[in-house]
Amino acid sequence: MSIDLAALWNPDRCRGLRLTNLCIYKFRIVMALSIGLSVAGGTMADMPRHTSFRFCLDPSVEQERVLSQHVGAARFAFNQALRLHKDARAAADRGQDQDSTPEAAAGTAHGGGSPEVGDVGSAVRVPWSGFDLINAWNSWKRSEAAGRRFVVDSTGMTRVEVTGLAWQDQVLAQVFEEACVDLGRGLKACTDSRTGARKGPRVGFPRFKKKNPTGGSFRIRNKTSRGRTGIRLGASEGHVRAVSLPKIGVLRVRECTRRLRRMIATGRARILHVTISRGANRWWISITVKAADLHPAARHSSQAVEAEADEGGVQPVGHGEKGWVGVDRGLHALAVAGRSDGTEVLRVSNARAFRRGLSRLRRLSRAVSRKKKGSKNRLKAVVRLSRQHARIRDRRRHALHQVSNQLVKNHDRLVLEDLNITGMTSNRKLSRAISDAAWGELARQITYKQAWRGGQVAVADRWFPSSKTCSACGTLRNDLTLTDRTFECHGCGHVMDRDLNAAVNLAAWAENHTPTLTNGVGSGVARVGDRQAAGPVKTAHRQDTPTHHDVRRRSGEGLDDVGTNPQTAPAA
């Protein structure tokens, strides 16, 4: 698709147009140009996937000093914006107490009135969102509270000169804005958690950030100006392993960036923002991009891809691997995958990264506690301790990515358990091992990687007894303990590994609770049968289902009145 701008833009047509029509005419030209560019090379509509590439930086001593300044500026902006928010809330509370009229109280509660924070007599606007916090920060950084100096003229008169934040020009302005945006997200998460709009554990109110010699980060958006993007890869002459950032310059990268550079060059990826973080004696950069879908050869088989493969095309991943695969997560074995017919397809032992590095971690922790606070030796000991924590985290992360990649690449349909990890970590005897296994992180990786490849992930019911149910006959064994590593059925005598038995039951649960496939299309109905119903239910107790049939409800009718009389009910 080609667009002739000369044909679109005609100066003669703009002479007789009014201002409103002229703006509309220019807007149509801009939209036509954007449509042409989007059709020519991958657009956001063609790139629905967000992903990140993480590289280790190799900065010089001067660049490390500049990066440290940006990290400190982000922390300072976050703390200052939080202080402005708290001061505004305190002023709003004082103003609401002084104003006895309902109109003033309503205006204060809804955040109306004057935006001035120090105005106590009127309604005070409290900044909550990221935009409001950015505006409050911009107003503060130019005020006298941010910086001032006393100037003495030749006559001896002294006057106060407002300088504002004197060092703000040394740091990229986006760092302050992104810190305010992060605070706005934290305030929204706290509010949604208290009102019930946010699920999961309760989120507390944001706290002030403290200085950390081995931590901290800042974020930079990828802005486009004069046809050039602010963030570029391979910008240095002779060094393709480099990232160019505005206001900071060219940073060397230790790893190879060829894959990301090719995706950007071919229009299959577009950089959104980068995050620079400080670790233990290392600097990291995480480049978040909006990328296109994976290649058809890397996606799971569908009708169209299978047809191409049958005709001699590229063989897709997971081709020939049919049926659901249950994944049981445990402590002895990190993941055990099996099919409903009892076939074991994968077994991964638990790496126990924290347990392996615990002895060294204790020794380094004791070394930190023996050093004097504020000394250089203590700072060196803290760095050594942080490096050990980073080593443990990297080992765990590497193992989880290996397991999730192997499961997602080879199987198009996976089923996981809905584990109450937060409740299980309350057990002080197993909390360390459960946290070291990182079951939640493994499930998160499997979920988004399977979505990238076009597969399916089902989550079994939390109360489904996958480990206590016999995969052969469906008998429920309630006396099974954690020490029993082999499942022995008392009904049929079936003997199987405990984890494999749970994986097989999960695969059977998914087959019983998902629609059947008719000619490759999911248009059938769910098959009946549930191994969870093997045996009587003994824990069902609800107030609206009394056990005695002569109990009357509030409406005046009992169980016999609605056709549930056991004497008149038909036999099953």
Image (tube, helix red, strand yellow):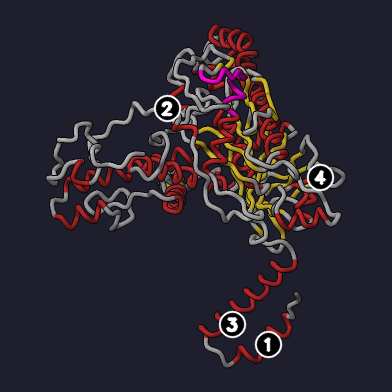
Of the image marks 3 and 4, the number of the one nearer the N terminus = 3
Foreground residue, 503 or 107? 503
Of the image marks 1 and 4, the number of the one nearer the N terminus = 1
Q: Magenta segment, which residues?
A: 491-503
Are there few (<14), some (14-19), or many (20+) residues within 10 Å of tag 3? some
Are the residues tagged 2 and 4 within 8 Å (C-beta)? no
Foreground residue, 334 or 553? 553
Residue 535's label in the rendered image is 2
Between the residue at mark 3 and the residue at mark 4, the CA separation in whole angstroms equals 42 Å
Of the image marks 3 and 2, the number of the one nearer the N terminus = 3
> What residue is shown with label 1?
10
Residue at 72 percent across and 59 percent down: it is 228
Of the image marks 1 and 3, the number of the one nearer the N terminus = 1
How far across and down, in percent of the image, does residue 23 sit?
55, 80
> What residue is shown with label 4?
258
Residue 336's label in the rendered image is none
Q: Judging from the image, what secondary structure is the residue with disc 3 in?
A: helix
Between the residue at mark 1 and the residue at mark 2, the CA separation in whole angstroms equals 81 Å
Between the residue at mark 3 and the residue at mark 2, the CA separation in whole angstroms equals 73 Å
